Image (spheres, rainbow, N blue to C red):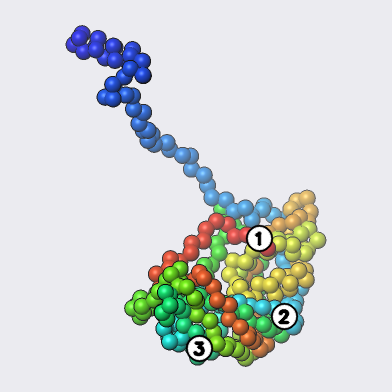
């Protein structure tokens, strides 16, 4: 035992430059579990109030013009025909049935790879021009945000591949020398009316005006219109013991929308977009304020 101790002492005293390969010191990281303190959830939009902001006048803009974008991926075969249409973003409901026949009837010049025509999944965008004729708030409820429950954004539906999509042979767009292009495209969607539920957070100032908005549930195509309308809403401001203050309020309600005719004369071709083997994007964190 004494001899073993002496040998070890000699090895430790030898300079690093004189060490043998089997004598080199190795520093190995060791994971040490550390118990983190529990942090209770908090809602940054919550404030202790005596009374919450309350809507007083809720007008909606009339004849509001704008552009709404539809995103889709289409399967274009080697002859330039569209055999499948998958919508990945719709500015509001009930547009798919109106646009699918027009897109499916569009003829493309086929994609080419190494000089040969090939089938591809083609991401594209359609910019629809039109206007919202008018609208009406049919019901609205204002509540104080819960102090321990952070707001959650309702996720937008993302398409999942069907069995028939996976069976279609397709060349990846990164291996395509020339993407398909439409020979002619023109779309028209007749005006329509519908009821739409909305959930949002509004920051109301001490003088009863809305200065910031967070949409929790609302179609993308209606958001610019609602933002412009909310700037004209009036509220009874929140109060504390000191008086009127700026505070957030959650608004849950329903609106009637009367949409005019929409039209588009062009398709925008994109390099990246949905395909049958694409992974759905993830969303996390708190919603941004507008």
Tag 1 near tag 3, CB within 8 Å: no
Q: Position of residue 262 (x, y in %)?
A: 65, 86
Observer able to see residue 125: yes
Horizontally, residue 21 falls left or right of residue 270, namely left
Q: Which residue is mark 1?
A: 289
Of callouts 2 and 3, the N-terminal one: 2
Disc 1 element: loop
Of callouts 1 and 3, the N-terminal one: 3
Using the image as rendered, state which of residue 53 and residue 93 is in the foreground: 93
Asked if 256 appears above or below 226 in the picture, the reply is below
Q: Which residue is mark 3?
A: 107
Which tag is nearer the camera, tag 2 or tag 3? 3
Quarter assignment of residue 152: bottom right
Q: CA distance from mark 2 to mark 1?
A: 23 Å
Q: What residue is at 81 percent from the left and 61 percent from the top?
A: 207
Which tag is nearer the camera, tag 1 or tag 3? 3
Q: Position of residue 15 (x, y in %)?
A: 36, 15
Q: Which residue is mark 2?
A: 65
Q: What residue is at 78 percent from the left and 58 percent from the top?
A: 206
Quadrant for the C terminus in the image? bottom right
Identity of the residue furthest to the front in this view: 115
Using the image as rendered, state which of residue 20 and residue 208 is in the foreground: 20
């Amino acid at each position: 035992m004494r001899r073993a101790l002496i040998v070890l002492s000699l090895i430790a005293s030898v300079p690093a430059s004189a060490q043998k390969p089997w004598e080199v010191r190795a520093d190995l990281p060791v994971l040490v579990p550390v118990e983190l303190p529990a942090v209770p959830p908090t809602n940054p939009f919550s404030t202790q109030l005596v009374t919450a902001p309350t809507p007083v006048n809720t007008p909606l803009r009339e004849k509001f013009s704008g552009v709404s974008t539809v995103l889709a991926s289409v399967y274009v075969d080697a002859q330039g025909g569209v055999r499948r249409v998958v919508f990945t973003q719709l500015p509001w409901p009930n547009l798919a049935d109106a646009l699918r026949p027009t897109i499916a009837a569009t003829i493309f010049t086929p994609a080419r790879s190494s000089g040969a025509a090939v089938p591809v999944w083609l991401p594209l965008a359609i910019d629809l021009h039109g206007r919202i004729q008018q609208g009406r708030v049919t019901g609205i409820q204002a509540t104080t945000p819960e102090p321990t429950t952070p707001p959650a954004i309702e996720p937008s539906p993302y398409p999942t591949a069907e069995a028939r999509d996976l069976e279609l042979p397709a060349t990846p767009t990164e291996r395509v020398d020339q993407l398909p292009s439409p020979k002619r495209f023109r779309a028209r969607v007749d005006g329509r009316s519908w009821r739409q539920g909305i959930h949002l957070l509004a920051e109301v100032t001490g003088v009863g005006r809305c200065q910031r908005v967070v949409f929790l549930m609302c179609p993308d195509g209606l958001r610019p219109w609602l933002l412009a309308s909310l700037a004209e809403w009036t509220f009874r401001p929140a109060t504390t013991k000191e008086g009127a203050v700026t505070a957030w309020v959650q608004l849950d309600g329903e609106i009637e929308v009367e949409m005019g005719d929409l039209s588009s004369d062009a398709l925008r071709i994109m390099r990246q977009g949905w395909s049958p083997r694409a992974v759905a994007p993830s969303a996390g964190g708190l919603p941004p304020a507008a």
